[in-house]
Image: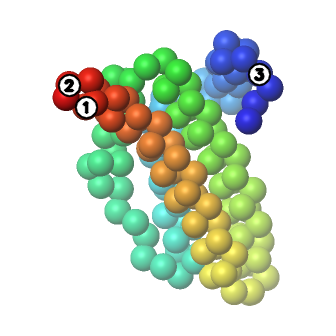
Amino acid sequence: MSALTPDQARAMRVTAQDASWPEASLAERWEQLHAQAERLAELASITPELFDENLALFPEHLTQCSQWQQDLAWQGIEDIDAMMQPGLAALHTINTRGQDTSAPALALWREFHAARNAVLAVAHVKQTCATAQAA
């Protein structure tokens, strides 16, 4: 949980985005995370997950959501990236040493999926609310 207000978090995100990912859109970041997940699956010795239409359309679906949902999804994507980059670097080091990466990679794979499901659920809230209002 953040001690920052939503406006402060948004300002920090915009500043961080301008500094580190000046041209990366949400869709690009989303695809990059799944490319990292594909490398992670290889290190875990499991079949990589398909980047299907549901996953590919998430950024487009998110544009129909409220601003707070978009902000929360962006922060979730940033958090996943912050977890994946050092995790993949550590796994690469283990792999370079000739050690088995499957167990730690599988643990990171599970963390990725849990975090990604939380991000996906942010957009699902809008869909659920819209469905409930229509009923």
Question: Residue 96 versus residue 60: which sits nearer the camera?
Answer: 60
| Residue found at x 41% / y 34% | 125
Where is residue 110? Give x, y as percent: 58, 66
Sequence-wise first label, 1 or 3? 3
Where is residue 26? Give x, y as percent: 48, 32
Q: Residues within 10 Å of mark 1 (few under 14, many from 20)?
A: few
Q: Which residue is mark 1?
A: 131
Sequence-wise first label, 2 or 3? 3
Q: Give the residue type that dot 1 points to.
A: Thr
In the rendered image, which quarter is residue 104 located in? bottom right
| Residue found at x 77% / y 21% | 4
Q: Residues within 10 Å of mark 3 (few under 14, many from 20)?
A: few
- Left or right, 132 with reference to 20: left
- Secondary structure at badge 1 equals helix
For the residues carrying marks 1 and 3, which lies nearer the camera in this image? 1
- Left or right, 121 with reference to 33: left
Q: Quadrant of the N terminus?
A: top right
Q: Which residue is mark 2?
A: 134
| Residue found at x 68% / y 62% | 88
Q: Give the residue type that dot 3 points to.
A: Leu
Distance from label 1 to label 3 (Cα)? 31 Å
Question: Residue 128 versus residue 105: which sits nearer the camera?
Answer: 128
Q: Residues within 10 Å of mark 2 (few under 14, many from 20)?
A: few
In the rendered image, which quarter is residue 114 located in? bottom right
> Contact (CB < 8 A) between labels 2 and 3?
no
Distance from label 2 to label 3 (Cα)? 34 Å
Distance from label 1 to label 2 (Cα)? 5 Å
Please, is residue 94 above or below residue 118 in the view? Answer: below
- Which residue extends farthest left? 135
- Secondary structure at badge 3 equals loop
Q: Give the residue type that dot 2 points to.
A: Ala
Q: Which residue is mark 3?
A: 4
